[in-house]
Image (cartoon, grey):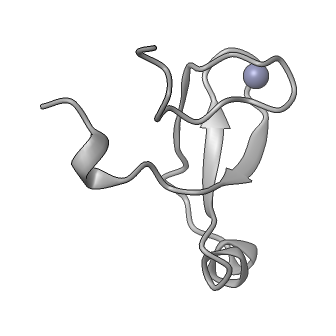
């Protein structure tokens, strides 16, 4: 499965999301729990998920 390590949008279920580039206070708080902010490219929903492990990324 090529989407195994890609974060999935909780709203639309799409895998087309990227880490949010604008940090907020809440992001610092969530990071404390090992979660980072993402934004879905399809529906623009902002959500939190675990970061994709570096060793599992395709070069
Ligand atoms: Zn979405």
Quadrant in which the C terminus is drawn: top left
Q: Residue at x 71, y 54 (%)?
A: 48
- Residue 28's image quarter? bottom right
The foreground one among 47 and 2 is 2
The foreground one among 39 and 58 is 58
Q: Residue at x 66, y 72 (%)?
A: 27
- Residue 8's image quarter? top right
- Residue 32's image quarter? bottom right
Q: Residue at x 76, y 47 (%)?
A: 47
Q: Is residue 51 left or right of residue 57?
A: right
Q: Is residue 57 left or right of residue 17?
A: left
What residue occupies the far right of the structure in this picture? 11
Ligand 1 occupies quarter: top right
Residue 12 at x, y percent in the picture: 83, 17
Q: Is residue 31 left or right of residue 47?
A: left
Residue 41 at x, y percent in the picture: 61, 22
């Amino acid at each position: 499965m090529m989407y195994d390590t890609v974060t999935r949008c909780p709203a639309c279920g799409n895998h087309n999301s990227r880490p949010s580039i604008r940090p907020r206070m809440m992001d610092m708080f969530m990071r404390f729990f090992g979660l980072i902010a993402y934004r879905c490219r399809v529906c623009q929903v902002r959500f939190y998920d675990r970061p994709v492990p570096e060793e599992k990324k395709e070069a």
